[in-house]
Image (cartoon, helix red, strand yellow):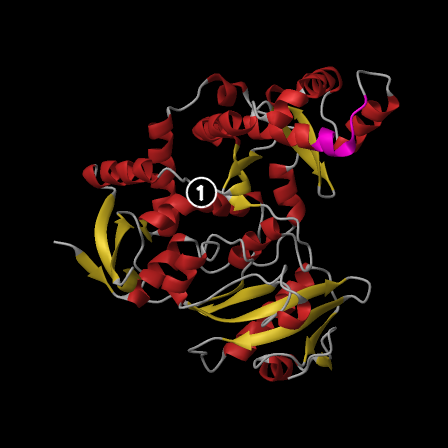
Amino acid sequence: MTTTLRRADARRIALAAQGFSRPRPETVGTRQITATLTRMRILQIDSVNVFSRSHYMPLFARLGAYDTSLLDALAFSRRPRWVESWAHVASLVPADDWPLLQFRRDDLRRKYGDDDWAQAHRPLLQWLRDELADRGPLRPAEIDHDARSGSRGSWWGWDDVKNGLERLWLFGEVAIAGRRGFERRYALASDVLPPSALETAVPRQDAITELVRRAARAYGVATAADLADYWRIRDRPAVLAAVRDLVDTGELQQVEVQGWSVAGRPATAWLHRDAARPRRVDAAALLTPFDPLVWFRDRAERLFDFDYRIEIYTPAPQRRFGYYSLPVLVGDDVVGRLDLKADRAGSALRVQSAWWEHGVPPDAAERVAAELRTAARWQGLERITVARWGDASDAIAGALSAARHEHPDGRSN
């Protein structure tokens, strides 16, 4: 018989699976960071840096203020323990997981390895391999300098060099050996990854089953679409086969969640056998749009009744909530969104807009204010200002006793 979960219970299960049911540690070191990363299994990378680089944010949401250089040491060193891979788009994954994603790299090679661009640039691709073999890890600008100098091989443009490096990375021939700022350093995979990661590849269906298992554990309770999206697996038959295998072994239990539906019918979901089922979750966090808790917009709507879209590419006059609004978690629900900007020249954390969602608890403004103070300290900013845009701006400004400012586009509340 299929078990039915209340929507609130499913929400708390999901939050606990992502690490939000635990109190933040008093101190954060490599051990706490590694444990949190291991729970999520993946950390999406994004270049937007209005408030903070996105890959730093999920750890901040779960652990509070921490030294980001500790994550840099794990992920952006010459021999990183976490490596960049095309997983849930560009992401950090454990170096030991490299063989699990070989089927993804094989798919990308079939798609891009022999297309018109690749055929026209075979000499460039081989030249790039030779450059990295001869010189070790290099930034694109360093490689481009040699390409333009004409001292080695033919002349190629910047776009060709960058495109070639990206393709070799997608295929797994090249890995990322750290970054300078946000610029990647490319190297042959054998110069970055441990030999064990390169010696074996996991068969496709076995790899998908393992990735679905990890997604199920990381989500707690999830639909098939949720499980597929965690790793952006587009092979639905393979995902469903993995689910069946995990049900047969007792790792997953089929459930229905009240209010979860697909095409007007109750959605089938699966509960991981090790999922904690807390009676209460009392978290407070600022979430990046690329946090696993909300990155799949359909799931965010099912869990939190939260309709979320990023407005980076929306013309400013048409934005409803701001350029890069962050979901705000209070208690066990997403209760608002804030458009934040770190004004480093002015040493200010600027709340560009602030909005409430449904079901705002009475202490929401004070708890959001506390998170903003923590965020400002984490970013080394001395003060907080709040714009007059959004129905939460007055309450949050009052809780902060913060200076008010007009939004840059002149909006006011």
Magenta stretch? 155-162
Left or right? Give the position of 393 relative to 138.
Answer: left
Q: Is residue 38 above or below residue 305?
A: above
Magenta portion: prevailing SS class: helix
Instruction: Point out residue 66 in the picture as x, y percentages from the top left corner.
Output: 62, 53
The residue that appears at 61% across and 84% down in the rendered structure is 394
Q: Is residue 243 above or below residue 163?
A: below
Q: Residues within 10 Å of mark 1 (few under 14, many from 20)?
A: some
Taking the magenta stretch, the answer to whether it contains residue 273 is no
Q: Residue furthest left?
A: 1
Taking the magenta stretch, the answer to whether it contains residue 158 is yes
Amino acid type of the residue tagged 1 in the rendering: Arg
Q: Is residue 362 above or below residue 13?
A: below
Left or right? Give the position of 154 relative to 222.
Answer: right
Instruction: Give the quarter of the figure containing the C terminus.
Output: bottom right
Rendering quarter of residue 368: bottom right
User: Which residue is more in the foreground, 239 or 132?
Assistant: 239
The residue that appears at 64% across and 32% down in the rendered structure is 166
How many numbered markers are drawn?
1
Q: Residue furthest front?
A: 116
Left or right? Give the position of 347 relative to 229.
Answer: right
Mark 1 residue element: loop
Q: Is residue 117 visible?
A: yes
Instruction: Point out residue 399 in the picture as x, y percentages from the top left corner.
Output: 61, 81
Rendering quarter of residue 174: top right
Instruction: Point out residue 203 in the picture as x, y percentages from the top left corner.
Output: 37, 24
Q: Is residue 34 visible?
A: no
The residue that appears at 61% across and 58% down in the rendered structure is 65
Instruction: Point out residue 334 in the picture as x, y percentages from the top left corner.
Output: 46, 68
- Disc 1 designates what residue? 232
